Image (cartoon, rainbow, N blue to C red):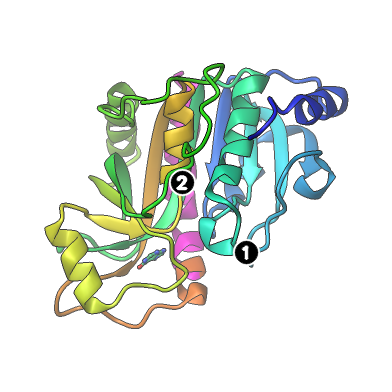
Amino acid sequence: MQKRLEDTIEYLNAKANFKPEIGIVLGTGLGGLVNVIEPVATIKYADIPGFPVSTVEGHAGQLMFGYLAGKKVVAMQGRFHFYEGYDIQTLAIPIRTMKLLGVETLLLSNAAGGMNPNFKVGDVMLITDHINLMSTNPLIGHNDEFFGPRFPDMSAVYDKALIQNAERIALEQGLQVQKGVYMAVTGPTFETPAEYRMMYRMGADAVGMSTVPEAIVARHAGMKCFALSIITDLGVEGVVEEVSHEEVIKVANAAEEKMTGIIKQLVAEM
Ligand code: HPA
């Protein structure tokens, strides 16, 4: 069972002494959002007591404190994935750290495969709900009532007002966005055509290997959540093509500007 991250918070307070109200988790190929943050302090995960260390390619592995559109934020440049071999409970650490630092709203992004036949590669999808198909849950184990209840409600994980605002902002910026249900799987394999078909029939519009554990931990701790996916490849019947991590990163990089524009304005209006 985790302690309440006293060492982690003490270290971050000593290093940054910054009370962010918004937390941001940047997905594969989407770390460039940090370029629009006015940094106050940047701290490598490897230097933070109690923090796991990121291993996957395309992730910088650091926490950045600073100002985005005038708001105090903390951004994770690089996240931790279950497929890297961490215990599922380890994925709670950065989110609970943000909570303890004072974060009230968590913004998440990811790269995802699209099953909805209306989707195109490069689309932004605002996540309206999720399906946890990881067959595990970051809240398994002793429940620390300090953070939240044993059996947390998940009836509205993604904040409706933030989704509405993001949709309007996208329109104002001349961007077409999709909305849909995100399904989380463990990875690291991409899906077979039969799996994509099953997932679509189960009610998911997109699939990926992240975000859901973090959203669960955030909701458990009473934080508001907003998440979006960049559709980097399609798992649509008849159009399933080969996928590679390189292609995912390339498409995510190309769509980064769209995501950055939406998040920046969303934060400005908070
Ligand atoms: N499946 C799972 N995860 C992903 C995909 C996908 O097709 N694309 C990007 N992340």
> What secondary structure is the magenta-colored segment mainly?
helix
Estimate the x, y position of residue 136 in percent, counting from the top left. Answer: 41, 50
Q: Quadrant of residue 173?
A: top left
Estimate the x, y position of residue 149 in percent, counting from the top left. Answer: 43, 20
Q: Quadrant of ligand 1?
A: bottom left
Residue matched to label 2: 109
Estimate the x, y position of residue 206 in percent, counting from the top left. Answer: 28, 57
Whether the magenta-drawn stretch holds residue 197 is answered as no
Q: Is residue 238 above or below residue 141?
A: below
Whether the magenta-drawn stretch holds residue 259 is answered as yes
**Do we see residue 70 in this rendering?**
no
Q: Is residue 257 above or below residue 247?
A: above
Q: Amino acid at mark 2?
A: Ser
Asked if the residues shown at circle 2 and circle 1 are in contact, with their CB atoms under 8 angstroms apart, the answer is no
Q: Which residues are magenta?
A: 250-270
In front: 129, or 123?
129
